[in-house]
Image: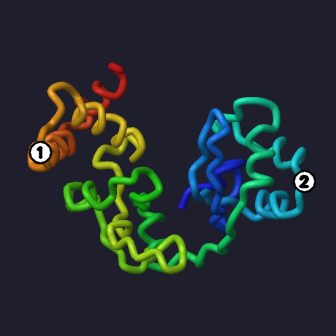
Amino acid sequence: MGNCALCDAEPPVAVVGIAHDDRLSFALPSRIEVGTRCLELLQGGHRQELADRLSSDFEDPGPGVVVDHLARSVISTALLPPLAPAVRAAMADGFVPLREVTGAGGMLGPLWPEQHRLWLDELGPLIEGDKDEDDCWLVRSPWPALSVPDVLSVLWRWVERDPYPTDRAEHADRIREVLAWSQERARYELEDR
């Protein structure tokens, strides 16, 4: 799995549910994965130390705004289950749970090149009771020089170009087209933007 959504410095141990607030000029995800120290700071009300830990990738629209919102908006906390051995082994081979990088796992998983995808029931739900079976895909990049997020960036730019696909079959054809490109073509498309 990825790292803590707040500090990006430690593996996540819990999923925190966050209430939405229409008064804010920004939106946080409804659930974020946090590491041990950030969870302790959040639960203990240590706002300044938590603010100091925010990664540079975490957009804070003003000093302490995100931390203040988090401190008053946590609605649930659930510990993450330990990773199954099959998932750990796949991740050691470069596979990434598709649900960590896109919300379109159910559509992309079956279209991903067969040698670069796995379906693992062992991945299981992120949240107890979450029965979304489309989230059991693990994928790795079909091109060694690009990460899975890079692949998705190239893929979505190509798939959503004009004219936008009007049906699911055309959408799927564009996805297959990109995933069949050479690494050189994919790198060109990534760097050209």
What mark, if any, has residue 178 been given in the picture?
none
Instruction: Identify the element where label 1 is drawn.
Output: loop
- The single residue placed furthest to the front in the displayed view is 23
| Front residue of this view, candidates 16 and 147 | 16
For this view, does 124 lie left or right of residue 173?
A: right
Choose between 9 and 38: the one closer to the eye.
38
The image position of residue 135, as x and y in percent, is: 38, 66
Question: In percent of the image, x 22 and y 28: which residue is there?
Answer: 161
Q: Which residue is mark 1?
A: 167
**Mark 1: few/some/many CA within 10 Å (<14, 14-19, 20+):** few
Picture quarter containing residue 19? bottom right
The amino acid pointed to by label 2 is: His
Query: Residue drawn 78% across and 54% down?
Result: 72
Mark 2 and mark 1 lie on one chain; the one further toward the N terminus is 2
Dividing the picture into quadrants, the one containing residue 75 is bottom right
Point out residue 60 in the picture as x, y percentages from the top left corner.
Answer: 71, 34
Q: CA distance from mark 2 to mark 1?
A: 50 Å
Q: Is residue 97 above or below residue 26?
A: below
Element marked by disc 2: loop
- At a point 56% along the width and 56% down the height, the residue shown is 2
- Say if mark 2 contacts mark 1, CB within 8 Å: no
Image height of 79 relative to 162, above or below: below
Q: Amino acid at mark 1?
A: Asp
**Residue 102: percent from left, percent from top:** 40, 51
Point 36% across, 70% down: residue: 136
Residue 50: x and y in percent read 83, 49
Q: Nearer the viewer, residue 183 or 150?
A: 150
Image-based side of 156 in relation to 49, left or right: left
- Classify 10 Å Cα crowding around label 2: few (below 14), some (14-19), many (20 and above): some
Q: Would you name the residue on which mark 2 appears?
A: 46
